[in-house]
Amino acid sequence: MIILSTQVRNNNYGIEQIIILIKMAITFVTSFFDIGRQTDAPMQKFDNYFAWIEELLKLPINIYFFTSPGLHNRFNYTPRPNLKFKFLPEIPYFDRLDDIKEAWKNYVTGNTSKDTAEFGAMTHAKFRLLCQAIIDDPFGDDHYAWIDAGLLKIATNPELIPSLTPPNKVRMMMLNYISDDEVKDPNFVYSCRYKYAAGLFIAPKVLMRVFCLLMIAQAEHDLFYNRFGLEQEYMAIIYRKYPELFDPYYGTFSDLIVNYLGCNRNSYVTKDILTTALKHNDKIEAAKVAKYILQAPDVNDSDKKISEICLRM
């Protein structure tokens, strides 16, 4: 919540500006728990997360942070009104960890030290935590975002996070094209992998709740049938089922922040997605990518011509 000063109240133009800021403010929700993952890999090692979290907590954004009292005591941060912590006695889904571990036997990954059943449960917990955050509504914002506590280990340009603009739909980043056939594949955990980046996504409050409930329902459905995957695979499924809810952007994991703002860094990603969409005769998805390419400030002539031709089809 932004507090109006006496000086600003006497300035009509200033009041108008601040009201806009209040209406467009975003609550960034995140979490950090010890899920018992044992690895010395630098990008997943437990103790390394505290430095990344410290950098996240420095950002002048509204943050609602789910964690435990013990871990909170290890965070190095300066208290402020728009940074709030909520302690949980138990992580969502961890009361059903036995069922998840049984279903996880069907999940094949090339990184068994990283992609554990506990990690899978934690990736889905974010949607229940988002629902709780929306209920708590700590800052009264109209938009909500999920941001992974360790996002800054891979995403560049974190200084741009405070300038991320609230979208009208669910805005999340596509890494690779996803087709209807892949979504319907019984082995969806393979075909839908690495299609969407789950570390940052933003939506209006109502749409975020809808998205979360759809994700929770899909996970519950699959767990009933003894299968379970990472949240990114389910995000791809929900996107193809309800494309009207989404306003995607495109890039690699490192582009999560900068490409949200309309840049097209690593433009080979959009070119690959556009080409693949056309191969599938998916004109709707191809048009979305083409529009994104044309809106980028640094679009090259070749990509511009291809995109313009695509939009005329």
Image (cartoon, grey):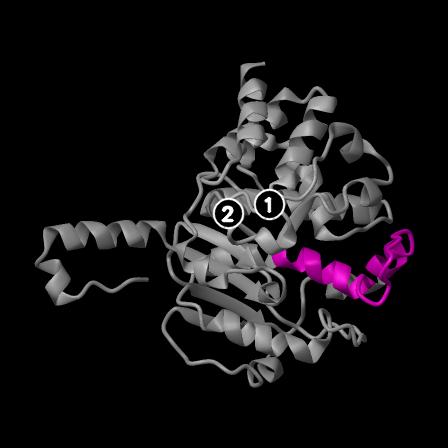
Q: Nearer the viewer, residue 164 or 170?
A: 164
Q: Where does residue 254 sit, x and y in percent of width and height?
A: 61, 56
Whether residue 85 is visible, yes or no, is no
User: Eyeballing the image, is 56 above or below 281?
Assistant: below
Does the magenta-highlighted stretch encompass residue 124?
yes
**What is the three-letter code of the residue carrying label 1?**
Met
Q: Residue 260's mark? A: 2
Q: Where does residue 234 sit, x and y in percent of width and height?
A: 71, 44
Q: Is residue 300 left or right of residue 193?
A: left
Whether residue 232 is visible, yes or no, is yes
Q: Where does residue 66 sit, x and y in percent of width and height?
A: 56, 69
Q: Nearer the viewer, residue 58 or 102?
A: 58
Q: Residue at x 58, y 77 (%)?
A: 51
Mark 1 or mark 2: name the one nearer the start of the chain: 1
Q: Quadrant of residue 174?
A: top right
Q: Quadrant of residue 131?
A: bottom right
User: Eyeballing the image, is 166 above or below 185?
Assistant: below
The magenta stretch is 99-126
CB of mark 1 within 8 Å of CB of mark 2? yes
- Look at the numbered disc 2 and give the secondary structure of its residue: helix
Q: Is residue 38 left or right of residue 282?
A: right
- Look at the numbered disc 1 and give the secondary structure of its residue: strand
Crowd band around label 1 with a 10 angstrom C-alpha radius: few (<14), some (14–19), many (20+): many
**What is the three-letter code of the residue carrying label 2?**
Tyr
User: Eyeballing the image, is 141 above or below 54?
Assistant: above
Crowd band around label 2 with a 10 angstrom C-alpha radius: few (<14), some (14–19), many (20+): many
Q: Which residue is mark 1?
A: 173
